[in-house]
Amino acid sequence: MDCNRCDEEAIMHAAYSGAHLCADHFRESVEKRVRRRIRRDDLVPHDATPENPQTWVIGLSGGKDSVVLTQILHDTFAKDPRIELVGLTIHEGIDGYRDKSVEACVELSEELGIRHELVSYEEEFGVRMDDVVEDDPENMAPCAYCGVFRRDLLSNYATELEADLLLTGHNLDDEAQTALMNVLEGDVEQIAKHFDASLGPLSDREEQDEFVPRAKPLRDVPEKEVALYAHVNDLPAHITECPHASEAYRGEIQQLLYELEENHPGTRHSILSGYEELADIAAERYAGDNGADLQNCVECGSTTTREVCRKCSLLESLA
Ligand code: SF4
Ligand SMILES: [Zn+2]
Ligand SMILES: [Zn+2]
């Protein structure tokens, strides 16, 4: 089958759009979607200037999503003095998994000439995920601990690096899954928070002084296309799955979405666009509730809704 836009052979077919694209046109189409998302989400503020540049911290795990995001942001902004990119990699302390992907992050950052920061649970908190899983004092899934530690590190380092924006490589499949999970859980306040934290145009979100805003400019691109983009560009992405991956419910939703997408191409796109509109409305409904009961953790000083933050209480029970 030929490419829809030239005479080259197509390397991919997207059932949701009907497109058949060759390698070059496929690349172009992915990049276009990411740049359009950056514009629509208003990520480059109008008052950004070369004298007053924005610092964008990218959560760089070394997996295909964050590697593709970093590459495209670099290609887009390398010559734009208003934006400075920093890659931030977190080492969880998982044997046989993270070491390789850290190498991928270092390699990519060197190749692109962007600043790279590496931080670890071990250095920051004195724990390694492999040991946490072994101890499991709270009888929880590994990702429940890991997520708390990661969020804490990301937001602390984003503050320390004076980030204006924290960008992550969530793709369309990830975001459609999260959207569906939030809807099925029936937690509208959570949906409102999701919007203010990471969706929608920056200018529409409720101000959150305490937190660096997040953005997910890859969320229009399906997971398979992100993987293909990494492959055709020969990017140093690392593919092994974490041995502690444990989000069983997400796995069920993922399976459900595969089937729906197969029978009704375009389902992920429609879930996400409908969800974003609803989340915007929910955010307005809950406006003003944000931050009302925030305080500083008595142990570490980070912003939390309790006296001792979740990270500190987990570390306490691990000690
Ligand atoms: S899969 Fe879970 S345990 Fe593994 S790195 Fe991700 S959040 Fe951490
Ligand atoms: Zn073509
Ligand atoms: Zn704390």
Image: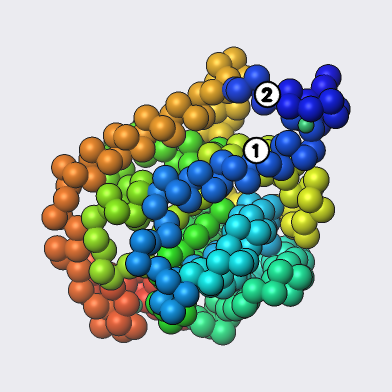
User: In this view of the protein, can residue 139 be seen by the observer?
Assistant: no
Between 42 and 188, the one lying in front of the other is 42
**Residue 64 in picture, x, y percent from top left:** 69, 52
Q: Mark 2 sits on what residue?
A: 19
Secondary structure category for the residue under label 1: helix
Measure how far apart labels 2 and 1 are at the Cα level. Answer: 10 Å
**Res 257 → quadrant:** top right
Q: At 65% from the left edge and 38% from the top edge, which residue is drawn?
A: 29
User: In this view of the protein, can residue 283 be seen by the observer?
Assistant: yes
Between 118 and 232, the one lying in front of the other is 232
Q: At 84% from the left edge and 25% from the top edge, which residue is drawn?
A: 7
Q: Amino acid at mark 1?
A: Ser
On the picture, is 103 further left or further right than 92? Answer: right
Location of ligand 2 given as a quarter of the image:
top right
On the picture, is 86 further left or further right than 64? Answer: left
**Residue 310 in picture, x, y percent from top left:** 35, 68
**Residue 48 in picture, x, y percent from top left:** 40, 68
Task: Kindly indicate whether the residue at mark 1 contacts the one at mark 2 (C-beta within 8 angstroms).
Answer: yes
Q: Amino acid at mark 2?
A: Ala
Task: Please tell me the numbered disc located at residue 120.
Answer: none
Q: Residues within 10 Å of mark 2 (few under 14, many from 20)?
A: some
Instruction: Quadrant for the N terminus, please.
Output: top right
Q: Could you tell which of marks 2 and 1 lies nearer the N-terminus?
A: 2
Mark 1 vs ligand 2: CB below 8 Å: no
Q: At 79% from the left edge and 51% from the top edge, which residue is drawn?
A: 233
Numbered-mark total:
2
**Residue 105 in picture, x, y percent from top left:** 70, 68
Between 32 and 139, the one lying in front of the other is 32
The outermost residue toward the top is: 263
Q: At 56% from the left edge and 34% from the top edge, which residue is drawn?
A: 254
**Res 210 → quadrant:** bottom left
Task: Please tell me the numbered disc located at residue 29.
Answer: 1
